[in-house]
Amino acid sequence: QVQVVESGGGLVQAGGSLRLSCAASGRIDWPYSMGWYRQAPGQERRFVAGISWNASDVKYSDSVKGRFTISRDGAKNTVRLQMNSLKPEDTAVYFCAVGATPDVPKFSYLYSYWGQGTQVTVSS
């Protein structure tokens, strides 16, 4: 049984910052990558950022490059997403996922486990 739990979502003004955290627990084969996706109302779930098992490989979507930072500086089963200079278009439910591969997966189906999501709302 595997659990993936996100935390840190909330309401923030445009230009502000927010930090999301995610912890995975249970019998997960090591090594594994982790990542973040987000889904806005009426839209499909889209990739935000991913990080490899040892943090040597980090990837971001073009829309968040330079503003968001993904890290694995806690326990190896924990990932953080620091979000700065937030924009209203960043408003979405953010999902944390555990990858089926050590390096950042190229497609969403290569993530094995998903969290319930945490709401991030950016006001204008």
Image (cartoon, rainbow, N blue to C red):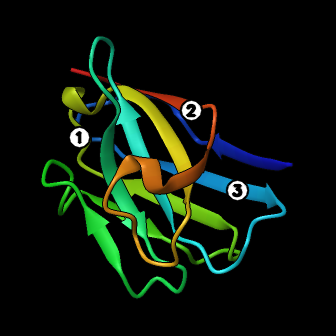
Residue occupying the point 63% across, 53% down: 22
The amino acid at mark 2 is Gly
Pointer 3 residue: 23
The amino acid at mark 1 is Gly
* Observer-nearest of 30 and 18: 30
Q: Which mark is residue 73?
A: none
Residue occupying the point 23% across, 47% down: 85
Q: Position of residue 123 (x, y in %)?
A: 29, 20
Q: Position of residue 27 (x, y in %)?
A: 84, 63
The answer to whether residue 69 is above or below residue 9 is below
Pointer 1 residue: 15
The answer to whether residue 17 is above or below residue 90 is below
The answer to whether residue 111 is above or below residue 32 is above
Residue occupying the point 30% across, 52% down: 84
Image quadrant where residue 86 sits? top left
**Which circle, 1 or 3, is nearer the viewer?**
3
The answer to whether residue 31 is above or below residue 60 is below
Gap between marks 1 and 3, in whole Å?
Answer: 27 Å
Seen as rendered, the residue at the extreme front is 109
- Horizontal side, residue 113 vs residue 44: left or right: right
**Total numbered badges shown on the rendered structure:** 3
Q: Earlier in the sequence, mark 1 or mark 3?
A: 1
Q: Tell me the quarter of the image containing the C terminus.
A: top left
Q: Which mark is residue 117?
A: 2
